């Protein structure tokens, strides 16, 4: 009998009290043993996932947002226990990149019928410990936006809350000189945004950054954005979106691309940082790729 632990974040943006029981019924009807674990604090998801590994569970599923999901994922790195997704947050970025349906019943079917994939993760060590990301690590503008978007606005408006914050803070964007070292090769840039990507879609399913970004290729992809004004920021944003579906990208004064396995970001002044949508610390920082770090259940 397959055994799964379903970690539930009851405060997630799209959390519904009836959803965990519905998902559990789908799994138990297929012969699975399902244990529910409800978080009450910021570190519970990781602890529940570690306990699931020790107890011999084959699958850890998460009903919540990206923060809860990546806490659980960090505890599963290097194990054969698969991570499953029941999207319940604002963005659910990794689930979206893996084509997980947002409908809970359909997402539960992926747990039963999906294939096991080994994906890469990005890894960053900060003063409070090791952090992993499945989609992107960002410094600068996106971290400002995510850090200034209130939780109650995300619960009420979903992704629209981020766009509203972007419109409000856009006039404050300005370039910061940075040195980015990519596999020992230095790059000096003046940027408003740095993205280090493991997946190519940053707003599933709408906003793709690069078509060749692949979480199973053993490398990470860099995008930097230069914008001297609010107008420049808008131009750069639309250029990045337009380039997300093109493989032969012409030179641009706003955008730079690179690939590598290790990135060190050193700005001339501290920049806020986010991992998969969660603000976390400030630059400088170093990112490494961890190839085939995590087993996931995906379509």
Image (cartoon, grey):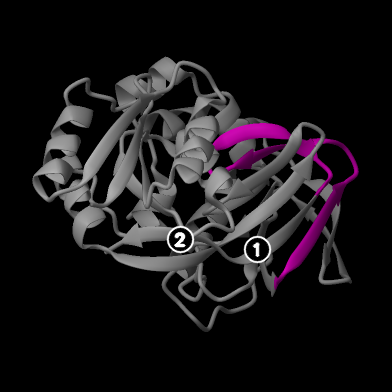
How crowded pointer 2 is (Cα within 10 Å; few <14, some 14-19, many 20+) is rated as many
Residue 108 marker: none
Callouts 2 and 1 close, C-beta under 8 Å: no
The image shows residue 11 at horizontal and vertical percentages of 38, 19
Q: Which residue is mark 1?
A: 290
Compare marks 2 and 1 and give the one earlier in the sequence.
1
Residue 194 x %, y %:
68, 52
Q: In the rendered structure, does residue 261 fall within the stretch colored magenta?
A: yes
Quadrant where the C terminus sits is: bottom left
Specify few, some or many for label 1: CA neighbours under 10 Å numbering under 14, 14-19, or 20 or more: many
Q: Is residue 101 above or below residue 99?
A: above
In the figure, 153 relative to 297: above or below?
above
Question: Can the viewer see residue 131 in this picture?
Answer: yes
Q: Nearer the viewer, residue 23 or 94?
A: 23
Q: Relative to residue 149, is residue 273 drawn left or right?
A: right
Residue range (magenta): 260-285
> How far is disc 2 from disc 1 in space, using C-alphas?
12 Å
Residue under numbered circle 2: 295
Considering the numbered disc 1 on the image, is that residue within a helix, a strand or a loop?
strand
**Any part of residue 98 in sight:** no
Pinpoint residue 34: horizontal percent, then vertical percent: 25, 38
């Amino acid at each position: 009998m397959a055994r799964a632990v379903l970690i539930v974040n009851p405060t997630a943006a799209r959390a519904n009290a009836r959803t965990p029981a519905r998902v559990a019924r789908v799994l138990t009807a297929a012969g699975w043993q399902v244990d529910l674990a409800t978080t009450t604090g910021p570190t519970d998801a990781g602890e529940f996932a570690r306990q699931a590994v020790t107890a011999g569970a084959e699958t850890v599923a998460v009903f919540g947002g990206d923060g809860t999901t990546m806490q659980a994922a960090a505890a599963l790195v290097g194990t054969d226990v698969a991570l499953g997704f029941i999207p319940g947050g604002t963005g659910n970025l990794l689930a979206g990149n893996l084509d997980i349906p947002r409908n809970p019943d359909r997402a539960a079917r992926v747990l039963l019928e999906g294939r096991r994939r080994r994906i890469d993760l990005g890894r960053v060590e900060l003063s409070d410990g090791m952090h992993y990301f499945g989609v992107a690590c960002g410094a600068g503008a996106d971290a400002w936006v995510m850090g200034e978007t209130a939780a109650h606005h995300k619960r009420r408006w979903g992704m629209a809350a981020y766009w509203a914050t972007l419109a409000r803070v856009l006039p404050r964007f300005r370039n910061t000189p940075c040195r980015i070292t990519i596999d020992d090769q230095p790059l000096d840039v003046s940027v408003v945004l740095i993205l280090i990507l493991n997946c190519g879609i940053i707003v599933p399913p709408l906003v793709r950054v690069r078509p060749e970004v692949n979480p199973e290729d053993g490398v990470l992809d860099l995008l930097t954005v230069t914008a001297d004004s609010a107008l420049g920021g808008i131009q750069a944003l639309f250029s990045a979106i337009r380039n997300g579906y093109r493989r032969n990208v012409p030179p641009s004064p706003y955008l730079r691309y690179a690939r590598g396995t290790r990135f060190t970001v050193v700005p001339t002044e501290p920049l806020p940082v986010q991992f998969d949508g969660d603000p976390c610390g400030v630059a400088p920082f170093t990112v490494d790729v961890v190839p085939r770090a995590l087993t996931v259940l995906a379509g």
